Image (spheres, coloured by chain):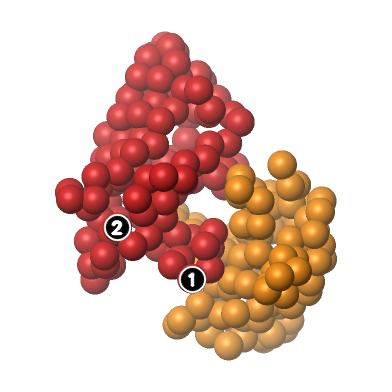
Amino acid sequence: DIVMTQSPDSLAVSLGERATINCKSSQSVLYSSNNKNYLAWYQQRPGQPPQLLIYWASTRESGVPDRFSGSGSGTDFTLTISSLQAEDVAVYFCQQYYDTRWTFGQGTKVEIK
Amino acid sequence: QVQLVESGGGLVQPGGSLRLSCGASGFTFSDHYMSWVRQAPGKGLEWISYISGSDNYIYYADSVKGRYTISRDNAENSLYLQMNSLRAEDTAVYYCVRVDHDALGALDIWGQGTMVTVSS
Protein backbone atom coordinates (compact mmCIF):
# COMPACT_ATOMS: atom_id res chain seq x y z
CA ASP A 1 0.00 0.00 0.00
CA ILE A 2 1.05 3.60 -0.55
CA VAL A 3 1.98 5.19 2.76
CA MET A 4 1.02 8.83 3.27
CA THR A 5 3.01 10.80 5.84
CA GLN A 6 1.96 14.25 6.96
CA SER A 7 4.02 16.88 8.75
CA PRO A 8 3.79 18.37 11.23
CA ASP A 9 1.40 16.38 13.43
CA SER A 10 0.11 19.67 14.83
CA LEU A 11 0.67 23.37 14.47
CA ALA A 12 -0.52 26.55 16.11
CA VAL A 13 -0.93 29.64 13.94
CA SER A 14 -2.10 33.15 14.78
CA LEU A 15 -5.34 34.36 13.26
CA GLY A 16 -4.69 35.89 9.85
CA GLU A 17 -1.37 34.11 9.45
CA ARG A 18 -0.42 31.35 7.00
CA ALA A 19 -0.66 27.67 7.84
CA THR A 20 1.24 25.07 5.80
CA ILE A 21 0.74 21.32 5.97
CA ASN A 22 2.91 18.83 4.11
CA CYS A 23 2.06 15.38 2.80
CA LYS A 24 4.51 12.89 1.36
CA SER A 25 3.60 9.66 -0.42
CA SER A 26 5.81 6.55 -0.42
CA GLN A 27 5.51 6.40 -4.21
CA SER A 28 4.42 8.81 -6.90
CA VAL A 29 0.69 9.44 -7.24
CA LEU A 30 1.12 11.24 -10.57
CA TYR A 31 -0.56 9.33 -13.39
CA SER A 32 1.52 10.02 -16.48
CA SER A 33 -1.23 9.38 -19.04
CA ASN A 34 -3.33 12.35 -17.86
CA ASN A 35 -0.71 14.28 -15.85
CA LYS A 36 -2.96 14.31 -12.79
CA ASN A 37 -1.94 13.81 -9.19
CA TYR A 38 -4.38 11.47 -7.43
CA LEU A 39 -4.28 13.36 -4.15
CA ALA A 40 -7.05 14.90 -2.04
CA TRP A 41 -7.22 16.99 1.13
CA TYR A 42 -9.94 16.91 3.77
CA GLN A 43 -10.88 19.06 6.74
CA GLN A 44 -12.45 17.52 9.84
CA ARG A 45 -13.79 19.99 12.37
CA PRO A 46 -14.35 18.74 15.93
CA GLY A 47 -17.33 16.40 16.16
CA GLN A 48 -17.98 16.51 12.42
CA PRO A 49 -17.36 14.15 9.51
CA PRO A 50 -14.56 15.07 7.14
CA GLN A 51 -15.18 17.46 4.27
CA LEU A 52 -13.46 17.40 0.89
CA LEU A 53 -11.37 20.54 0.31
CA ILE A 54 -9.06 19.76 -2.61
CA TYR A 55 -8.79 17.03 -5.26
CA TRP A 56 -6.35 16.42 -8.11
CA ALA A 57 -3.86 17.96 -5.61
CA SER A 58 -4.85 21.54 -6.44
CA THR A 59 -8.52 21.75 -7.51
CA ARG A 60 -10.73 23.33 -4.87
CA GLU A 61 -14.06 21.65 -4.21
CA SER A 62 -17.09 23.84 -4.88
CA GLY A 63 -17.80 26.18 -1.97
CA VAL A 64 -14.35 25.92 -0.40
CA PRO A 65 -12.90 29.37 0.42
CA ASP A 66 -10.02 30.47 -1.78
CA ARG A 67 -7.72 30.87 1.23
CA PHE A 68 -7.28 27.09 0.91
CA SER A 69 -4.88 25.99 -1.79
CA GLY A 70 -3.11 22.77 -2.70
CA SER A 71 0.17 22.32 -4.52
CA GLY A 72 2.82 19.74 -5.30
CA SER A 73 3.34 16.81 -7.62
CA GLY A 74 4.64 13.28 -7.61
CA THR A 75 5.35 12.46 -3.98
CA ASP A 76 5.36 15.84 -2.21
CA PHE A 77 2.29 17.95 -1.58
CA THR A 78 1.26 20.99 0.44
CA LEU A 79 -2.00 22.38 1.76
CA THR A 80 -1.83 26.09 2.50
CA ILE A 81 -4.31 28.19 4.43
CA SER A 82 -3.31 31.70 3.44
CA SER A 83 -4.98 33.58 6.29
CA LEU A 84 -6.14 31.40 9.17
CA GLN A 85 -9.67 31.99 10.41
CA ALA A 86 -11.21 30.73 13.65
CA GLU A 87 -13.40 28.28 11.74
CA ASP A 88 -10.32 26.61 10.24
CA VAL A 89 -9.48 24.94 13.56
CA ALA A 90 -9.62 21.30 12.52
CA VAL A 91 -7.66 18.21 11.64
CA TYR A 92 -6.53 18.01 8.02
CA PHE A 93 -5.93 14.76 6.15
CA CYS A 94 -4.37 14.00 2.80
CA GLN A 95 -5.45 10.92 0.83
CA GLN A 96 -4.14 9.17 -2.27
CA TYR A 97 -6.49 7.53 -4.75
CA TYR A 98 -3.81 6.51 -7.26
CA ASP A 99 -3.75 2.93 -6.04
CA THR A 100 -6.81 0.67 -6.01
CA ARG A 101 -6.51 0.70 -2.21
CA TRP A 102 -6.81 4.24 -0.97
CA THR A 103 -4.84 5.50 2.00
CA PHE A 104 -4.88 8.56 4.25
CA GLY A 105 -2.19 10.48 6.05
CA GLN A 106 -2.27 10.42 9.84
CA GLY A 107 -3.71 13.94 10.08
CA THR A 108 -2.45 17.38 11.10
CA LYS A 109 -4.19 19.30 13.86
CA VAL A 110 -4.40 23.06 13.32
CA GLU A 111 -5.01 25.32 16.31
CA ILE A 112 -5.01 29.03 17.03
CA LYS A 113 -1.90 30.44 18.68
CA GLN B 1 -30.18 17.99 -0.88
CA VAL B 2 -27.50 15.38 -1.18
CA GLN B 3 -27.52 13.23 1.94
CA LEU B 4 -26.15 9.98 3.30
CA VAL B 5 -27.59 8.45 6.46
CA GLU B 6 -25.96 5.48 8.15
CA SER B 7 -27.63 3.05 10.50
CA GLY B 8 -26.99 -0.30 12.13
CA GLY B 9 -24.15 0.50 14.49
CA GLY B 10 -24.07 -0.65 18.09
CA LEU B 11 -22.37 -2.84 20.65
CA VAL B 12 -21.33 -6.32 19.58
CA GLN B 13 -19.19 -9.01 21.21
CA PRO B 14 -15.85 -10.07 19.73
CA GLY B 15 -16.45 -12.65 17.02
CA GLY B 16 -19.91 -11.29 16.35
CA SER B 17 -21.48 -9.78 13.25
CA LEU B 18 -23.16 -6.54 12.34
CA ARG B 19 -24.67 -5.11 9.16
CA LEU B 20 -24.44 -1.41 8.46
CA SER B 21 -26.78 0.35 6.07
CA CYS B 22 -26.56 3.70 4.34
CA GLY B 23 -29.47 5.45 2.68
CA ALA B 24 -28.67 7.92 -0.07
CA SER B 25 -30.80 10.76 -1.40
CA GLY B 26 -30.50 13.84 -3.58
CA PHE B 27 -28.37 12.33 -6.34
CA THR B 28 -28.37 9.49 -8.88
CA PHE B 29 -27.02 6.76 -6.64
CA SER B 30 -26.13 4.31 -9.39
CA ASP B 31 -23.85 6.87 -11.07
CA HIS B 32 -21.41 6.88 -8.17
CA TYR B 33 -18.87 4.58 -6.63
CA MET B 34 -19.53 4.38 -2.88
CA SER B 35 -17.16 3.72 -0.03
CA TRP B 36 -16.90 3.01 3.69
CA VAL B 37 -14.29 4.80 5.79
CA ARG B 38 -13.83 4.30 9.52
CA GLN B 39 -12.28 6.29 12.33
CA ALA B 40 -11.30 4.71 15.63
CA PRO B 41 -11.85 6.93 18.70
CA GLY B 42 -9.31 9.74 18.70
CA LYS B 43 -7.54 8.35 15.64
CA GLY B 44 -7.22 9.08 11.95
CA LEU B 45 -9.21 7.96 8.93
CA GLU B 46 -8.98 4.46 7.50
CA TRP B 47 -10.43 3.56 4.11
CA ILE B 48 -11.91 0.07 4.27
CA SER B 49 -13.83 -0.63 1.05
CA TYR B 50 -15.42 0.74 -2.10
CA ILE B 51 -17.82 -0.52 -4.73
CA SER B 52 -18.48 0.69 -8.26
CA GLY B 53 -21.87 1.90 -9.42
CA SER B 54 -22.73 -1.41 -11.04
CA ASP B 55 -20.83 -3.39 -8.35
CA ASN B 56 -18.40 -4.93 -10.81
CA TYR B 57 -15.41 -3.37 -9.01
CA ILE B 58 -15.00 -4.01 -5.29
CA TYR B 59 -11.88 -3.49 -3.18
CA TYR B 60 -11.07 -3.94 0.50
CA ALA B 61 -8.34 -2.88 2.85
CA ASP B 62 -6.21 -5.78 4.08
CA SER B 63 -7.43 -5.15 7.63
CA VAL B 64 -10.99 -6.23 6.74
CA LYS B 65 -10.58 -8.44 3.68
CA GLY B 66 -12.29 -11.79 4.16
CA ARG B 67 -14.37 -10.51 7.10
CA TYR B 68 -16.30 -7.58 5.60
CA THR B 69 -18.54 -7.53 2.52
CA ILE B 70 -19.68 -4.37 0.81
CA SER B 71 -22.81 -4.38 -1.35
CA ARG B 72 -25.37 -2.02 -2.78
CA ASP B 73 -28.97 -1.94 -3.96
CA ASN B 74 -29.37 0.74 -6.59
CA ALA B 75 -33.14 0.31 -6.70
CA GLU B 76 -33.26 1.15 -2.99
CA ASN B 77 -30.46 3.79 -3.11
CA SER B 78 -28.72 1.90 -0.36
CA LEU B 79 -25.20 0.83 0.53
CA TYR B 80 -24.38 -1.96 2.96
CA LEU B 81 -21.46 -3.30 4.94
CA GLN B 82 -21.68 -6.81 6.37
CA MET B 83 -19.10 -7.17 9.13
CA ASN B 84 -18.23 -10.63 10.46
CA SER B 85 -15.67 -11.97 12.93
CA LEU B 86 -15.50 -8.58 14.60
CA ARG B 87 -12.50 -7.67 16.74
CA ALA B 88 -11.88 -5.01 19.36
CA GLU B 89 -9.76 -3.09 16.85
CA ASP B 90 -12.80 -2.74 14.58
CA THR B 91 -14.30 -0.32 17.11
CA ALA B 92 -14.80 2.94 15.22
CA VAL B 93 -17.20 5.40 13.69
CA TYR B 94 -18.08 4.06 10.24
CA TYR B 95 -18.77 6.63 7.55
CA CYS B 96 -20.68 6.03 4.36
CA VAL B 97 -19.06 8.15 1.65
CA ARG B 98 -19.85 9.05 -1.93
CA VAL B 99 -16.99 8.96 -4.42
CA ASP B 100 -16.66 11.94 -6.73
CA HIS B 101 -17.88 11.04 -10.23
CA ASP B 102 -14.97 12.68 -12.05
CA ALA B 103 -12.14 12.46 -9.53
CA LEU B 104 -12.61 8.77 -8.92
CA GLY B 105 -11.29 8.33 -5.42
CA ALA B 106 -11.95 11.77 -3.98
CA LEU B 107 -14.64 11.43 -1.32
CA ASP B 108 -17.05 14.29 -1.78
CA ILE B 109 -20.08 13.55 0.41
CA TRP B 110 -19.87 12.01 3.90
CA GLY B 111 -22.58 10.75 6.20
CA GLN B 112 -22.58 11.61 9.90
CA GLY B 113 -21.31 8.15 10.77
CA THR B 114 -22.49 5.26 12.91
CA MET B 115 -20.57 3.99 15.92
CA VAL B 116 -19.56 0.33 16.15
CA THR B 117 -18.22 -0.90 19.47
CA VAL B 118 -16.74 -4.37 19.75
CA SER B 119 -16.46 -5.38 23.37
CA SER B 120 -17.41 -8.16 25.76
Pointer 1 residue: B102
Instruction: Tell me the subunit letter for badge 1.
Output: B
Q: Nearer the viewer, residue A88 or B113?
A: B113
Which of the labelled discs sits on residue A88, or is there none?
Answer: none
Residue found at x 41% / y 55%:
B33
Q: Is residue A19 above or below residue B65?
A: below
Residue found at x 55% / y 44%:
B47
Residue B17 seen by the camera:
yes
Instruction: Tell me the subunit letter for badge 2.
Output: B
Snapshot quadrant of residue A79: bottom right
Question: Which percent across, then down, holds residue A96?
Answer: 66, 57
Pointer 2 residue: B30
Q: Using the numbered discs, state the Cα–Cα distance from disc 2 to disc 1 in whole angstroms.
A: 14 Å
Q: Is residue B75 above or below residue A110?
A: above
Chain ID, red in image:
B
Callout 1 secondary element: loop
